Image: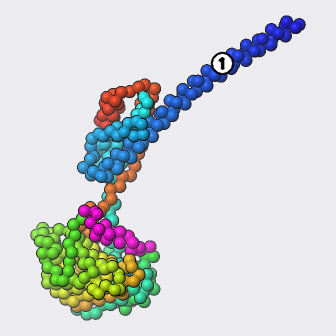
């Protein structure tokens, strides 16, 4: 009996030994699989990082929309190819990430668009004022322009009509203006509109981008008497000069005669009450401006004669110490909404526009996950993927 027990015990030990050996072998295999998984994951991360680097490269270089580049990324390589699909503004991007013999491929379909800093025009006159004490607004005269001095009806006939005046608050507007809902001098799809989300900081962002010089936009300083030479020659096909950016900065400018301009006109001051000369725009005669006219911390907008602004005028303060802004439309002045003005303003500020890529689809695959692919083979693979052969 004792011998039988020993045999049984020995059998158990042998069985346990076999079991223990198989466990250690499984752990070794598991460790190998874990290493492969980690390397495949790293290759996948490199493919994603390569796509991000390529998108940044396309933002920096608008001319790069077809071709291939290779980037060293976190101990591995990302080979990236881009091609235009033939569909408007859609780009295909393929990124192959390689790390320690593991290869992962990522294919993206991107939609490219332009995010302009120019605010979308929402009225003939936009009042970005928080307090009624910030401004005064009145109209006198008008001649035969009744109902048309401030007009939100689209002059081009291509777009929907807008309100004549848009303000952030009805009480602020009514307290600061001598015009009411019965005014004969304002027209549009409605005479007045109110939007509590109006934020002049969005307009200031555009002003700073244009005025700082960092955007590469060339602008013209206007002061004293302004003539056609300041705005450029009139294009005989369009009847207006090419759009530009024009700035009246802490000074007074007078536009008169039959001068014509287009693009963006900015009248601004620091808002410092100690500055002797504040920003002031005076108009007389029959000048025209097609586009966006912006007043930041300015002193006054006054008109006489038959000045016409086709587009929109925006008025606001970025400095609470800025002087009270006085708007006086006299004579036969006309502020007429024209949706083509949005295009002129966008063209003038085109260099400030931000390119945006939106992901429409993504497809990820492993390529020879356990083989050591050399660089030439991977480059060939990437070329095949771009050409749609795989």
Residue 2 spot, x, y in % from top left: 87, 8
Q: Quadrant of residue 293?
A: bottom left
39 versus 85 height, above or below: above
Q: Which quadrant of the rendered structure holds the N terminus?
A: top right
Q: Does residue 16 appear in the picture of this structure?
A: yes
247 versus 58 height, above or below: below
Nearer to the camera, 340 or 380 = 380
Nearer to the camera, 313 or 32 = 32
Q: Residue at x 21, y 75 (%)?
A: 221
183 versus 315 height, above or below: below
- Asked if the magenta segment contains residue 208, the reply would be yes
Residue sticking out furthest to the bottom = 141
Q: Residue at x 61, y 21 (%)?
A: 25
For residue 100, side relative to residue 259 (left or right): right
Q: Which quadrant of the rendered structure holds the C terminus?
A: top left
- Asked if the magenta segment contains residue 103, the reply would be no
Residue 264 spot, x, y in % from top left: 25, 72
Q: Secondary structure at mark 1?
A: helix
Magenta range is 197-216
Q: Quadrant of residue 376?
A: top left
Residue 346 spot, x, y in % from top left: 27, 66
Residue sticking out furthest to the right = 1
Determine which residue is flagged by label 1: 21
Q: Quadrant of residue 333?
A: bottom left
Nearer to the camera, 161 or 342 = 342
Q: Residue at x 31, y 85 (%)?
A: 275
Residue 103 spot, x, y in % from top left: 42, 32
């Amino acid at each position: 009996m004792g011998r039988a027990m020993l045999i049984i015990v020995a059998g158990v030990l042998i069985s346990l030994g076999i079991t223990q050996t198989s466990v250690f072998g499984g752990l070794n295999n598991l460790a190998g699989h874990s290493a492969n998984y980690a390397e495949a994951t790293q290759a996948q991360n490199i493919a994603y990082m390569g796509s991000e680097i390529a998108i940044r490269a396309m933002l920096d270089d608008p001319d790069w929309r077809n071709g291939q580049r290779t980037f060293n990324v976190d101990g591995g390589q990302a080979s990236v190819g881009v091609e235009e699909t033939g569909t408007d503004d859609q780009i295909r991007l393929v990124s192959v990430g390689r790390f320690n013999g593991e290869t992962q491929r990522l294919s993206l379909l991107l939609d490219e668009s332009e995010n302009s800093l120019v605010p979308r025009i929402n009225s003939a006159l936009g009042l970005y004022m928080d307090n009624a004490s910030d401004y005064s607004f009145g109209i006198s005269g008008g001649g035969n322009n009744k109902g048309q001095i401030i007009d939100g009806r689209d002059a081009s006939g291509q777009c929907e009509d807008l309100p004549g005046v848009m303000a952030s608050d009805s009480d602020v507007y009514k307290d600061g203006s001598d015009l009411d809902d019965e005014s004969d001098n304002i027209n549009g799809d409605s005479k007045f509109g109110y939007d509590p989300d109006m934020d002049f900081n969005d307009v200031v962002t555009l002003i700073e981008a244009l005025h700082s010089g960092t955007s590469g936009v060339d602008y013209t300083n206007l002061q004293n008497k302004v003539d056609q030479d300041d705005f450029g020659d009139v294009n005989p096909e369009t009847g207006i000069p090419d759009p530009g950016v024009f700035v009246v900065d802490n000074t007074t400018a007078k536009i008169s005669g039959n001068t014509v301009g287009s693009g963006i006109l900015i009248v601004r001051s620091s808002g410092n009450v100690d500055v002797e000369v504040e920003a002031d725009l005076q108009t007389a005669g029959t000048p025209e401006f097609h586009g966006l006219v912006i007043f930041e911390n300015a002193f006054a907008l006054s008109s006489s004669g038959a000045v016409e602004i086709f587009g929109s005028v925006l008025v606001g303060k970025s400095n609470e110490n800025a002087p009270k802004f006085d708007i006086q439309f006299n004579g036969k002045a006309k502020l007429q909404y024209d949706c083509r003005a949005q295009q002129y303003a966008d063209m003038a500020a085109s260099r400030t526009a931000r390119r945006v890529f939106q992901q429409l689809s993504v497809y990820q695959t492993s390529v020879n996950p356990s083989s050591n692919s050399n660089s030439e083979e991977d480059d060939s693979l990437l070329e095949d993927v771009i050409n749609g052969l795989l």
